[in-house]
Amino acid sequence: MEIITETERFVVREMHEGDAEGMLLLDSDVRVHKYLGKKTISRKEEALQQIRKVMDQYEAKGIGRWAIEWKTNGEFVGWTGLKYESDFGPLQEFIDLGYRLRPEYWRKGIGLETAIFSRDYAFKTLNAKDIYASSHVDNAGSIHILEKIGFEWQEHFYYEDLKCNWYKMSR
């Protein structure tokens, strides 16, 4: 397990199968999925499948979502980071910046802090020319983070009947 960065409050690191319980807590919560099409999971095996997909992307593309671990208790807070995407949104292939947190960790600045780190990692470490992000049009918290770190709104698009905002940032 590689640590990507560490702050006073948390560790951002590669995901591993030991994160399955935390991932299940995250993705079984209807509040988390309010703007994600309400497709919650209910079994640990589903969480493991998600984690394995992330681990496969580390191997294949050298990037992927990272786990956020709270330092004081070692809990899986959620995930952040970059993902190589294809066939999602208006583009065919791109680097997507995203984050997802358990509700008890909302409004603590974690989404903003880790999004800034992910943005900087994309440009400084990966030398990416452009990165993209999306958010449901009603997800004010996510929209605030994306705009605050410098993403610019491009257009609306629909993902599985959900109206979303499409954002871009260039180096």
Image: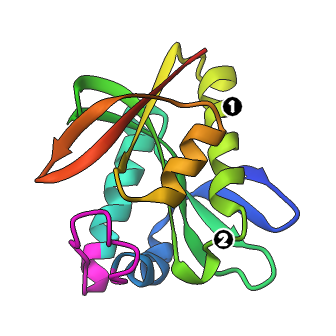
Give the percent coordinates (x, y) of residue 133. Answer: 43, 38
Amino acid of disc 2: Arg
Q: Amino acid at mark 1?
A: Asp
Residue range highlighted in magenta: 28-46
Q: Mark 1 highlights which residue? A: 120
**Marks 2 and 1: in contact by CB < 8 Å?**
no
Marks 1 and 2, how far apart at CA: 22 Å
Horizontal relation, residue 21 to residue 110: left or right: left
In this view of the protein, can residue 2 be seen by the observer?
no
**Residue at 75% across, 49% down:** 5
Which is nearer the N-term, disc 1 or disc 2?
2
Q: Nearer the viewer, residue 78 or 59?
A: 78
Is 149 placed above or below 145 here? Answer: above
Question: Residue 98 in magenta?
Answer: no
SS at badge 2: loop
| In-image side of 113 versus 93 (left or right) | right
Where residue 126 appears, as percent x and y from the top left, is 59, 23
Question: Which mark is nearer the camera, 1 or 2?
Answer: 2
| Image location (x, y in percent) of residue 106 | 61, 73
In the picture, the quarter occupied by the C terminus is: top right
Which residue is depicted at the point 25% across and 77% down? 40
Q: Secondary structure at mark 1?
A: helix
Number of callouts: 2
Q: Examine the structure image and report whether residue 37 is included in the region drawn in magenta.
A: yes
- Above or below: residue 114 compared with residue 45: above
Expressed as whole percent of the image width and height from the top left, the position of residue 1 reads: 61, 57
Q: Which residue is mark 2?
A: 107
Q: Residue furthest left?
A: 161
Direction from residue 25 to residue 109 in the image, left or right: right
Which of the 4 image quadrants contains residue 28?
bottom left
- In this view, the residue in front, 152 or 130, is 152
